Image (cartoon, helix red, strand yellow):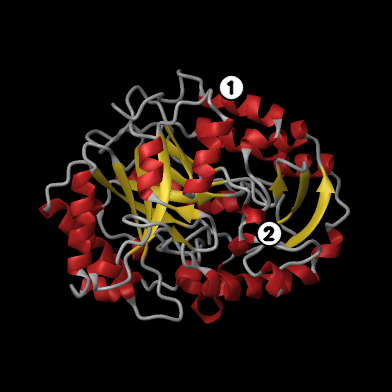
Amino acid sequence: MKFVNKTTAAGLLLATYGLTACSQSDKDNNQSASELIQSNKQTITESVQYQASSTFEGAKFLPPNNKQLLFIGQDSDTISEYIAGNPEDNIEAITLYTTLKTANPAQALPAVYQVANWQAGDVSFTQSLSESPNAALAIGLALDRCNDVDHAQNIADGKYDESITLMNQYFASIAPRKVFLRIGYEFDGAWNCYSPESYKKAFIRISNKIAQANLDNVATVWQSAAWPDPTIAGDDAAKYDFTNPDHLNQWYPGDQYVDWISLSVFYRDLTQWNYEPKYTPDFAQQQILRFAKEQKKPVMIAEAAPQGYRTSALTHSYIQLNEQTPITAEALWDAWYQPFFDFVKTNQDVIRAVAYINTNWESQAMWYCAEKSGPPAADCANGNWGDSRVQANPLIKQKWLDEINDAQRWIQTSEY
């Protein structure tokens, strides 16, 4: 739901839950900022308990001394703006996106060799890597197939091998820069329309091709959407349901093909929701952490931002309805950032990398949502995202810098 090539599929699926959300929103619309913060502290009730300690001996690119690696994303424009607006932060890692959806290498990997734009800011690997020459790189590699051919199956069948070869040649060309490759990211997000069997086969083929090319600078990342409402998928809801104890297993390619396990964290509770989904976001997130510990894999939060908030305007709204209410900078930090960092710190033994999306979402056509609107309206097709730029507010920026420049918790270089 968070970046590449989701304009049609995401709109349809967000429209599905938007119909429910808008009809139930009146009960929440007048909730105050202080009530939201209190709700934020009270509604996480379904945490899965697991053993507190684990080790990941030999895990690829694992930061040393139990520290964590921070990525900034997700398009070249906003990465540049983050660098300019936060000179106090050394950039250890960045996040960019591309696609693998063609057998023709000349048309493959948009943004890698030329600028691409999916109505969500320019993406240029050349620009961003030149601006951060020592940074590690996380790549969201989209294979999604909504209203299209089954790209994952084509990959599994070897039809895109020449394009994979081109991709691997690029990885070799930027070595020893670390690459965290998120293959078919958010595999269990219904908006991507993957099928478990073809997805797993595609992941395995790409992973094998990387191994055959002896690319020591590439780690494979398996990323769940951690979405709490499988009902948006209609008849296919069972494929996306975290209450199914076999949910993650049905999508998992296997330990030998996966270096990192990953998830998206745009909300920790239901503060940003104006209806109640099947389970809380925390429930899904905890399932992923538990699974990662069972598989002895480190975890990356590959996508995170305070969806529905505006750091610039200091307002809050719901992700399914853009009806803004004022909030102070302190309250915004307490409502989203502090619980997020508490979650990361509490699970520091398993969460070893975090990617933050520092974007003025509503300035980008893909993510624009008109005031008083929500999905399925054409002027809010992909939901309400807001503005997550930390440098847009002095207090939030300072608190952010105090957090991520803590050298006891966060590694301050990619060269480890």
Residue at coordinates 25% horizontally, 38% vertically from top-left? 60
Left or right of 142 in this view: 404: right
On the rendered image, what quadrant is the C terminus found in? top left
Amino acid tagged 1: Asp
Is residue 41 placed above or below 367 in the rendered structure?
Answer: above
Quarter of the view holding residue 212: bottom left
Amino acid tagged 2: Asn
Circle 1 SS class? helix
**Residue 185: percent from left, percent from top:** 40, 58
Q: Are marks 2 and 1 in contact (CB under 8 Å)?
A: no
**Residue 57: percent from left, percent from top:** 24, 33
**Residue 242: percent from left, percent from top:** 50, 61
Circle 2 SS class? loop
Mark 2 vs mark 1: which is more N-terminal?
A: 2
Q: Which mark is residue 187?
A: none
Residue at coordinates 54% horizontally, 75% vertically from top-left? 8
**Residue 323: percent from left, percent from top:** 81, 58
Residue bearing mark 1? 402
Q: How many tags in the picture?
A: 2
Residue bearing mark 2? 384
Quarter of the view holding residue 59: top left
Most foreground residue, 117 or 49: 117
Q: CA distance from mark 2 to mark 1?
A: 28 Å
Residue at coordinates 42% horizontally, 41% vertically from top-left? 94
Is residue 296 placed above or below 145 in the rendered structure?
Answer: above
Question: From where the camera sits, is residue 291 visible?
Answer: no
Is residue 202 placed above or below 216 in the rendered structure?
Answer: below
- Crowding at label 1, few (<14), some or many (≥20) Cα neighbours within 10 Å? few
Question: From where the camera sits, is residue 97 visible?
Answer: yes
Most foreground residue, 12 or 380: 380
Most foreground residue, 2 or 370: 370
